[in-house]
Image: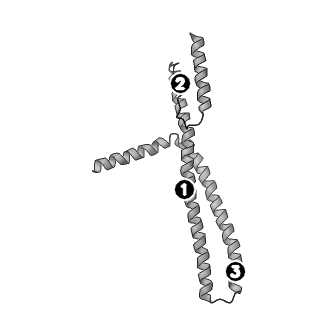
């Protein structure tokens, strides 16, 4: 049973590594997306907290409430901020996952193009680019294949 777990873990790990075809490019892409998202989270949380806190100070401190009621309202304000921040971080995580998926659709075709270029460099003029249907650069692949067909036709 342990060997099947290792095998499953290896398969899962291999699938994740397949998503990171060009880690430098993809992680740089995801880094900038996540950094921007994290900055937005902090700015929104700060703006929300300081404006609401200011209004709370005016409304709560000047109202004829007990100290316990005031403390409860301030505690609820902190809980709201915590929940909004947690929700924002979950959203940021989803954006990062989406960024990896989108960058994979770009990095995958570039990886394939590089392999085809290497084949042509080795003398295989019949090498053609075949991308998955959802990959980016379909038009580039079609133009490249048409160019290679033209070169092969002219060389005969």
Residue 15: horizontal and vertical position, in percent?
44, 43
Q: Residue at x 58, y 20 (%)?
A: 148
Residue 35: horizontal and vertical position, in percent?
61, 54
Q: Earlier in the sequence, mark 1 or mark 3?
A: 3
Give me the C-alpha separation between circle 2 and circle 1.
Answer: 37 Å
Q: Is residue 154 above or below residue 39?
A: above
Mark nearest the camera among 3 and 2 is: 2
Residue 154, quarter of picture: top right
Q: Earlier in the sequence, mark 2 or mark 1?
A: 1
Tag of residue 128: 2
**127 displayed left or right of 150:** left
Q: Is residue 17 above or below residue 124?
A: below
Q: Residue at x 55, y 30 (%)?
A: 113
In the current view of this chain or complex, which residue is farthest to the front?
133
Marks 2 and 1: CB-CB under 8 Å?
no
Q: Tell which of 45 and 145 is nearer to you.
A: 145
Residue 110: horizontal and vertical position, in percent?
56, 34
SS class of the residue under badge 2? loop
Q: Earlier in the sequence, mark 3 or mark 2?
A: 3
Dot 1 corresponds to which residue? Answer: 93
In the current view of this chain or complex, which residue is farthest to the left?
1
Q: Residues within 10 Å of mark 2 (few under 14, many from 20)?
A: many
Q: Residue at x 58, y 13 (%)?
A: 153
Residue 105, quarter of picture: top right
Dot 3 corresponds to which residue? Answer: 57
Q: Residues within 10 Å of mark 1 (few under 14, many from 20)?
A: some
Q: Is residue 3 above or below residue 59?
A: above
Give me the C-alpha separation between circle 3 and circle 2.
Answer: 68 Å
């Amino acid at each position: 049973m342990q060997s099947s777990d290792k095998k499953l873990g290896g398969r899962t790990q291999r699938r994740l590594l397949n998503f990171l075809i060009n880690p430098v490019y993809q992680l740089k892409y995801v880094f900038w997306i996540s950094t921007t998202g994290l900055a937005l989270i902090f700015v929104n949380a700060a703006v929300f907290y300081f404006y609401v806190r200011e209004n709370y100070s005016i409304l709560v401190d000047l109202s004829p409430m007990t100290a316990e009621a005031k403390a409860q309202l301030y505690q609820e304000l902190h809980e709201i901020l915590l929940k909004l921040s947690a929700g924002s971080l979950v959203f940021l995580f989803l954006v990062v996952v989406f960024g990896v998926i989108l960058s994979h659709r770009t990095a995958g075709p570039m990886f394939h193009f590089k392999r085809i270029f290497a084949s042509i460099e080795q003398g295989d003029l019949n090498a053609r680019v075949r991308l998955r249907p959802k990959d980016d650069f379909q038009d580039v692949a079609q133009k490249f294949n048409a160019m290679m067909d033209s070169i092969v036709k002219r060389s005969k």
